[in-house]
């Protein structure tokens, strides 16, 4: 509780300097590595450069993760009964933003640097981007607990693999993670009781050190 309160206080100081929305460039859907090559290159990396992603790379990444790819609003990853229960929080050095897939933009949630709160590993505070996948159980009010957990986990896994394949195609490093203080992070992100943090995923340029090859899975 104390950790989350301090994080929220620190974030609030930077609120006035942070744009409330960030329009993303149109995603480039015609380039990239062939699928079989991307699958061959897919791996986890735990060493990250501090270099920021370009707006275009961030746009492409989020669209690949869970963007709208059809006129009816359906996404690049499947969801049970098309409920689209997973929200993606993009934790950047400047602020935390919620990915608005319909408008393809980022909407401000919390100003300030909360990257360290997204996991217990040291690299999360250095990498330029941490994605936090949050299930909104309010979208499944009549679904049994075990079923909605299963549905949300499957949806999260599909999104995470989309990110892995995009990163493999573009030469980024990424790793999906579960080690974090979920309660503190949920409070820092102002989540409702019906929202549940599923996993986080770190993305960035590889540091290209020998340690980057350790622990690949």
Image: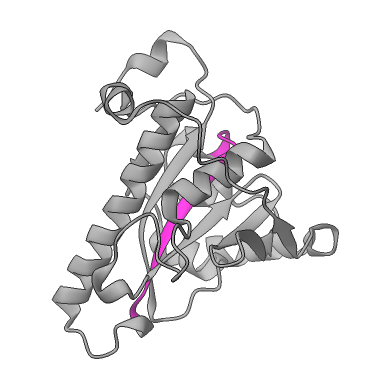
- Split into 4 quadrants, where in the image is the C terminus? top left
Numbered range of the magenta stretch: 125-137
Residue 176 lies, in percent from the top left, at 35, 42
Question: 23 or 150: nearer the eye?
Answer: 23
Residue 125 lies, in percent from the top left, at 56, 39
Magenta span: chief secondary structure: strand
- Asked which quadrant contains residue 3, the reply is bottom right
Q: Horizontal placement of 139 versus 5: left or right?
A: left
Residue 23 lies, in percent from the top left, at 71, 56
| Residue 171 in the image: above or below residue 26 | above
Question: 178 or 6: nearer the eye?
Answer: 178
- Asked which quadrant contains residue 100, the reply is bottom right
Residue 141 lies, in percent from the top left, at 29, 89
Q: Which residue lies at the image location 67% right of the left edge and 35% below the top edge?
A: 54
Q: Which residue lies at the image location 47% right of the left edge and 60% below the top edge?
A: 68
Question: 73 or 120: nearer the eye?
Answer: 73
Looking at this view, name the residue that lies furthest to the top.
210
Q: Which residue lies at the image location 38% right of the left edge and 81% below the top edge?
A: 194
Residue 49 highlighted magenta (yes or no): no
């Amino acid at each position: 509780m104390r950790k989350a309160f301090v994080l929220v206080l620190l974030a609030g100081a930077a609120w006035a300097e942070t744009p409330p929305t960030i329009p993303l460039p149109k995603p480039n859907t015609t380039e990239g590595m062939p699928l079989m090559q991307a699958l061959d290159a897919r791996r986890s990396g735990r060493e990250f450069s501090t270099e920021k992603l370009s707006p275009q790379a961030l746009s492409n990444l989020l669209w690949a993760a869970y963007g709208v790819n059809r006129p009816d609003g359906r996404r690049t990853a499947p969801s049970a009964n098309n409920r689209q229960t997973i929200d993606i929080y993009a934790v950047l050095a400047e602020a935390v933003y919620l990915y608005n897939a319909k408008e393809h933009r980022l909407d401000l949630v919390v100003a300030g640097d909360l990257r360290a709160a997204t996991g217990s590993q040291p690299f999360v505070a250095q990498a330029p981007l941490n994605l936090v996948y949050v299930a909104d159980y309010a979208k499944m009010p009549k679904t049994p607990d075990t079923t909605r957990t299963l549905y949300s986990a499957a949806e999260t896994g599909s999104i995470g693999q989309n990110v892995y394949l995009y990163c493999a195609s573009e030469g980024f490093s990424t790793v999906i993670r579960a080690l974090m203080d979920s309660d503190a992070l949920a409070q820092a992100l102002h989540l409702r009781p019906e929202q549940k943090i599923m996993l986080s995923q770190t993305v960035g340029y590889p540091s290209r050190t020998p340690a980057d090859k350790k622990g690949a899975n």
